[in-house]
Amino acid sequence: MNVYSQHKVKLSIGILVSALCIYLAFRKVDFSEMLQAFQTANYWYLMPAAGIIFFSHLLRAFRWRYLLDPIRRLDISDLFSSLIIGYAANTFLPAHLGEFLRAYVLGKNQKISMSPVFATIVVERIIDVFSLLALMLLALFIYPFPEWVIESGYIMLAGTIGLLIFLIFLKKATSPTMQFISFIMKPLPEPFEHKTKAMLEKFLAGLLPMKRWSDYITVSLLSFIIWICYGFVFFFCLHAFDFVETYHLEWSTSLILLVITTIAVVVPSSPGYVGTYHYLCQITLAMFGVSAGPALSFATVVHGVCFIPVFIVGLFFAHLQGTAILKMPEDTVEVEEGPRSGEI
């Protein structure tokens, strides 16, 4: 099965999961309550929420710069535009292909090999999962999560640790790890095996330690602030629907919503996490007494404020750079390596 066939299978599974979640979300909804929630919401609260979204992405660009510094020092503006283009593409592309587009755009514009750039994005995602799990641990002291949420945390932890161990072996014991990869890929066509190994060798170029020990502290601090920003998005949206006063919600509700809805990123779904995000948001609010209709209205608005502004700005950046945002460029041939750090 080639890469495109795999993506089609993943997309099909994701659409089925999303369709199931949409059915579950709507099956007990009182549409008059849902409409009333839309009509009575104070949408002015969405302005600071959208501003925080872009501020968090700017912080992500700063954090990404530290991960890329061992390869080359890059301008924040270039990192920010590539990041927004990739995030905008994730709205419509399946299987997080926007992350590949993000690496492709930055690599092409800066004359850097795409593979090491993508390696820094993988490291970034590992940092995000550990940050989320730390928040989940904090939230456990505040609110007794359902068992399925805790089990989801264990699955994410196991998967992330497994990926981290693989990357460590790939970096520290490259030769035996590559031999093991060759062994498990024997049933596959030989050209595919060679291409995969060549890609991994270039991928390794991005798995570099940061320049200074203080950079690790800075990256950790930036990660913490980024996730706090996401919590504030929920905070403003809860006020937009007047849920805080109506249901006497504590500040921790935003944290619990953040932890549970982020599971939607892990669950296979359609592009943009449609359905999974809305259903998880709905059942989280149900724990605090919010009925299904208003909860689904809330989920729709939060999802929209997180995705629509980013998609619009991403389209603008993509237009400026001549990039097709709704599909992966066919020209994904590696560009020439640029100068290493210290050469510029």
Image (cartoon, rainbow, N blue to C red):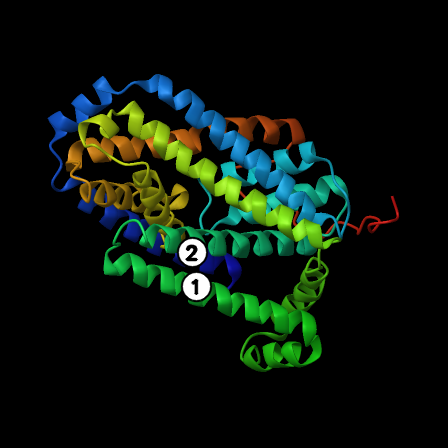
Query: What residue is drawn where x is 74% and y is 53%?
Result: 212
Dot 2: what SS?
helix
123 or 91, nearer to the observer: 123
In the rendered picture of this protein, how many numbered marks are placed on residues?
A: 2
208 or 274, nearer to the observer: 208
As drawn, the residue found furthest toward the front would be 141
The residue indicated by pointer 1 is 157
Task: Tell me the number on the disc at residue 203.
Answer: none
207 or 321, nearer to the observer: 207
213 or 10, nearer to the observer: 213
Query: What residue is drawn where x is 48% and y is 49%?
Result: 96
Q: Residues within 10 Å of mark 2 (few under 14, many from 20)?
A: some
Percent x, y for residue 166? 57, 71
Q: Residues within 10 Å of mark 1 (few under 14, many from 20)?
A: some
Are the residues tagged 1 and 2 within 8 Å (C-beta)? yes
Please identify the quadrant where the C terminus is shown: top right
Mark 1 and mark 2: Cα distance apart in space? 7 Å
For residue 274, say whether it is visible.
no
The residue indicated by pointer 2 is 133
Dot 1: what SS?
helix
